[in-house]
Amino acid sequence: MSTRDAVPTALIVHAHPEPRSFSTAQMTTAAQALRDAGYLVDVLDLYSQAWAPVLTREQFAPVEGHFKPQAEQQRAVRDGDLDATVKAHLDRLLAADLLVLSFPLWWFSLPAVLKGWIDRVFVMGGVFGGEYGLFADAALAGKRAMLLFTTGGSGESFRPGGDFGPMDDFLFHIHRGMLEFVGYQVLDPVVTYGPARMTDVQRTAALDTVRRSVALAAAHARPAVH
């Protein structure tokens, strides 16, 4: 049995600007639950690292004429001159058995800093395209991913017939268009609805629910032992 099989790894990519937020408390709770389940946990806090989310031509070798971002990503991977910070994050992504995206749901989607992390780190030629295909043929096939997030609205508002409609409708573009697209098997999301409207007692109970939910997901996400 290899070390990788014996010690599964998780990468948590966290996107909340306030370290005292419930979202951050939820992330640290999830990280500890994964450690307790035997995972080696790597945390990328995008705000604390002042991550630059905008993909620009200046991040690549000089290009004459029309700039095609994905073509430049593929060329940079091939030539070994991918931006150093992006390369470091890509290496951490590829090393992880489980990816956890931790964030508050803003405008029914990812915060800009996290979407920008996807734009820059899910590079063509590194996780899909080039020698890789899409979905089951992409680089991250066989690995798992899950969303860990909070909402402003109540759970009732995200149900069929609720004010916003089913949560799955809002998550499809993330689950299918980002995570499954690069090969991940997507686990059920862990969601805390409306923590800002909770009492301290309710928030403590919500974190206990997060702990249990992540522990259950961790058991399902363990890679097979060879």
Image (cartoon, rainbow, N blue to C red):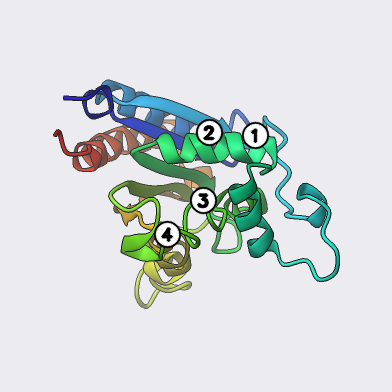
185 left or right of 174 in image: left
Q: Position of residue 28 (x, y in %)?
A: 45, 28
Q: Residue at x 55, y 33 (%)?
A: 44
- Give whichever of discs 1 and 3 has the lower sequence position: 1
For discs 1 and 3, the disc positioned in front in the rendered view:
3
Task: Please report contact status of discs 2 and 1: CB closer than 8 Å, yes or no.
Answer: yes
Mark 2 is on which residue type?
Thr
Q: Is any part of residue 30 visible from this angle?
A: yes
Query: The N terminus is located in which quarter?
Result: top left
Query: The C terminus is located in which quarter?
Result: top left
Local crowd size for mark 2, using a 10 Å CA cut-off: few (<14), some (14–19), many (≥20): many
The numbered disc on residue 18 is: 1
Helix, strand or loop status at disc 1 = loop
Cα separation between marks 4 and 2: 34 Å
Between 201 and 165, the one nearer to me in the picture: 165
63 left or right of 69 in image: right
- Give whichever of discs 2 and 1 has the lower sequence position: 1
Helix, strand or loop status at disc 4 = loop
The numbered disc on residue 126 is: 3
Task: Please report contact status of discs 1 and 3: CB closer than 8 Å, yes or no.
Answer: no
Mark 1 is on which residue type?
Glu
40 left or right of 113 in image: left
The numbered disc on residue 132 is: 4
Between 185 and 106, the one nearer to me in the picture: 185
Cα separation between marks 3 and 4: 8 Å
Task: Please report contact status of discs 3 and 2: CB closer than 8 Å, yes or no.
Answer: no
Q: Position of residue 218 (x, y in %)?
A: 26, 37
Local crowd size for mark 1, using a 10 Å CA cut-off: few (<14), some (14–19), many (≥20): few
Cα separation between marks 2 and 1: 7 Å
Local crowd size for mark 4, using a 10 Å CA cut-off: few (<14), some (14–19), many (≥20): some
The numbered disc on residue 147 is: none
For disc 2, the marked residue is 24
